Amino acid sequence: MVVLGAGPAGLLLGNLLHRGGIDCVVLERADRGHVQTRARAGFLAANTVRILDRHGLAGGLHRHGREHGACEFRTAEGRFRLDYGGLGRGERHTVYPQQDLVTDLLTHYLEAGGRIHFGTEALAVHDAGTTRPSVAVRETDGRPGHWRARYVAGCDGRHGAARRSLPPGAVRHHRDHGISWLGLLAQAPPSLDAVGYAVHDRGFAGHMARTPEVTRYYLQCERGTAAAARSDEDLWDELDTRMYAPEHGPLNRGRFLHRGVVDFESDVIEPLRHGSLLLAGDAASLISPSAAKGANLAVLEAELLAHALVADLAHGDPRALDRYSRQALAHIWRAQEFSHWMIRLLHREPSAPGSESFFHESLRLSRLESLRTSRTHQDWFAENYTGV
Ligand code: APR
C-alpha cells in the first residue's frame, strides 16, 4: 500500500493499516518539522474522539484537549448562548490543535515501526485501472523515483497528485460560496468560554479557543484581501467592533502568530474510488471552515478506508472497499449540507441584488431567531454541529 500525505487522514490510515498487518509506506512532500507545526484546525467532534479512542490514539487529546459544549451568537438584536452539549445527542467538541493530533499520530506510527518518507513529493499516480498502480515521485534529493503497490490512497489534499491523476470519469462538484475569512491565530487567552459567532453589518467575526494562551479568530473579508493588509491594532479594533456585547468588555488582545485568508469553496469528488486509487480527506472533498468539519471528515474517512483495505488485503473480502465511496460520500454530503446552512446563517447573501438581499437578510434573521427560541431547532443544530 502507498499512502500519499501525512495529514490527519494519511497518518490515521497508515496507523490502522500497519496495525492490520498491511505493508504500507506514507509519502509526504514536506519535512517532518513542517508537518508537526502546521497550525490548522483543532475542533474535534465527539465521533472523532471515539474513533481515536477505539484505536488507542487519543492519549494526547485526553491529556491536553479541552471539552467544549457552548456557542454564543452575537447580533445587532442581542446575544444568545447555546449549551449544545446538553442538546441533541448531548455531544461536545474537544479543542485540540491539529498539529498536536498530527504529532501524536506520527509518533504512534513511527513507534510501531511504520514507514514514512518525508520530502518525497508524489507527482502522479499511474495505472490506477490495474492491480499494480504506481506513483511517480521526486525523492528528497530531487531524483525521480517510483513506488508500486496493490492500492494507492490519495490523502494528499486538494492540490495533491491523487486529484491530478483522476481518470476522465471522475466528477468534481464545485461551489464557490463567494465568502472569504481572514483567519488569525492570536497569542491571547480566549475572551469567551464558548465558540463566538458575531453577525455584524460589517461582516462576520468568529472566536474559537485553541489553548488557554492561544485563540483563533476569523474576520469576514473581501475576496482577494491580503492577509497582511491591516495592522494588528486595526484588526483588534475591527474584532472588538463586530464582536461587541455590552455585557462583555473588550477582547483579550495579543500578537497575531499567524494570518491567512480562506476563500469558501466546496469541492467534492465522485466517486472516491477509481480502480486501485482511493481518496480520503481533503483529496476527497473540500469543505468550508464554517462548521469545522474538515478534519473530522478526514478522520472518519480514514477509518472507513482502513477497515475496507484490511478486509480486502488481509482477508480477501472486497465488499467493504466496494462500499467505501458511497458510505464516505453520504457523510461528506451531510457535512456539506450543514456547512452550507451555517454559511447562510452567519453571512449576508454575498451577491443578492437590492430587494433580493433584503429578502435573504430577513430569512437569515428569522433562522437566527428560530435557533434562539425553538428547542427542536436547537436539538437539530446540536446534532449536526457535533455530528460528522
Ligand atoms: N506528495 C506528497 N505529499 C503531499 C503532496 C504530494 N504531491 N501534496 C500534498 N501533500 C501532503 C501535504 O504536505 C500534507 O501534509 O499531504 C498532506 C495533506 O494533509 P492535510 O492537508 O492535512 O489533509 P487531510 O489529512 O486530508 O486533512 C484535511 O485537516 O486541517 C484540516 O481543515 C483541514 O479539512 C482539512 C483536514
Image (cartoon, rainbow, N blue to C red):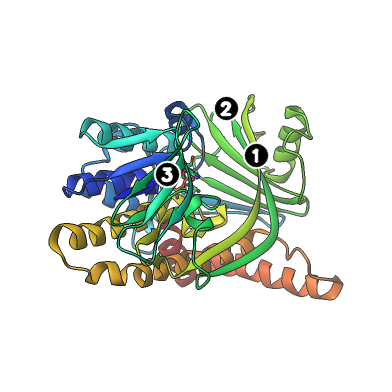
Which tag, 2 or 1, sits closer to the chain's start? 2
On residue 303, which mark appears?
none
Q: Nearer the viewer, mark 1 or mark 3?
A: 3
Q: Which residue is mark 2?
A: 188
Q: Where on the picture, by quarter, is residue 7?
A: top left
Beta carbon of the mark 3 residue lies under 8 A of ligand 1: yes
Q: Are marks 2 and 3 in contact (CB under 8 Å)?
A: no
Q: Nearer the viewer, mark 2 or mark 1?
A: 1
Looking at the rendered structure, the kind of residue marked 3 is Gly
Q: CA distance from mark 2 to mark 3?
A: 32 Å
Q: Are marks 1 and 3 in contact (CB under 8 Å)?
A: no
Depth check: give the residue in front, 135 or 20: 135
Q: Position of residue 363 (x, y in %)?
A: 68, 73
Q: Residues within 10 Å of mark 1 (few under 14, many from 20)?
A: some
Beta carbon of the mark 1 residue lies under 8 A of ligand 1: no
Which tag, 1 or 3, sits closer to the chain's start? 3
Q: CA distance from mark 1 to mark 3?
A: 22 Å
Q: Position of residue 154 (x, y in %)?
A: 42, 53
Q: Position of residue 355 (x, y in %)?
A: 84, 75
Q: Which residue is mark 3?
A: 5
Q: Where on the picture, by quarter, is residue 281?
A: bottom left
